[in-house]
Amino acid sequence: MKLEIYQILEQYMDSCMQDSAHDKEHIYRVLYIALDIARFEQNVDYDILIAACLLHDIGRQEQFENPKLCHAEIGAQKAYCFLIESGFKKVFAESVKACIQTHRYRNDNIPQSIEAKILFDADKIDVTGAIGIARTLLYNGQLSEALYTKLPNGLISDGTNDKQPSFFQEYKFKLEKINSCFYTKRALQLATERQQAAKAFYESMLSEVSISYRLGISLLEQQLSESDFEKG
């Protein structure tokens, strides 16, 4: 890809990015990881791959404003329109659009081309390991979601069967299972190298809050049963 083409795509991407958990640095990490993965694959169209990586999250703001929208669908259409209006060939715009449409984890659309599979994998790598934990917590905070939820008995849920969004729920729903969804061997290798950091953080946090709740509830009950304090 020529530098001037890259800069046109980069400038448009930059104008669309307003989400701190999905900022332009996330875009660059995905792009760099994708280029790493692509080294181990054959017949990769790097122009399509680079364009798809740069533009894959340009629909995030629309989804943030209306959670019923899918940023992958919105972003794919925005990218297609931008590419056509900027003079790119229709077949190129359609290929980039298809990659973006299928990059989302919460989506039934399956990546078909090697470029789409690489984009999917690279995007998921950025939710593994320490960076994945940091981004998840940042995004949860933006949405005012809790770190964890409580069970009916007042103790802490590990997130397994939670319906209410929280960090623990997201870890059990997505982060813990992410290694089973990759299309390329290189992505699985990268994710496996990072996996222990995320697991250790989750288990440490679950242990810390669970112990404090179990002990704290017991101590509070003891104080309430022993107190002879009366108002007035």
Image (cartoon, rainbow, N blue to C red):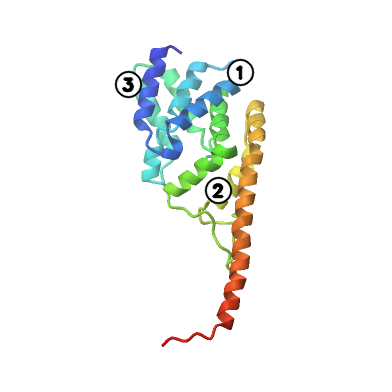
Is residue 111 at least partly visible in the picture?
no
Q: Quadrant of residue 6?
A: top left
Seen as rendered, the residue at the extreme top is 2
Label 1 residue SS: loop
Name the N-terminal-most of marks 3 and 2: 3
Name the N-terminal-most of marks 1 and 3: 1
**Residue 126: % across, % down:** 54, 34
In this rendering, the answer to whether 151 lies above or below 123 is below
Q: CA distance from mark 3 to mark 2?
A: 38 Å
Q: CA distance from mark 2 to mark 1?
A: 31 Å
**Of the residues shown, which amino acid type is indicated by label 3?**
Glu
Q: Which residue is mark 3?
A: 85
Q: Which residue is mark 2?
A: 170
Q: Quadrant of residue 110?
A: top right
Q: Quadrant of the C terminus?
A: bottom left
**Of the residues shown, which amino acid type is indicated by label 1?**
Arg
Seen as rendered, the residue at the extreme left is 85
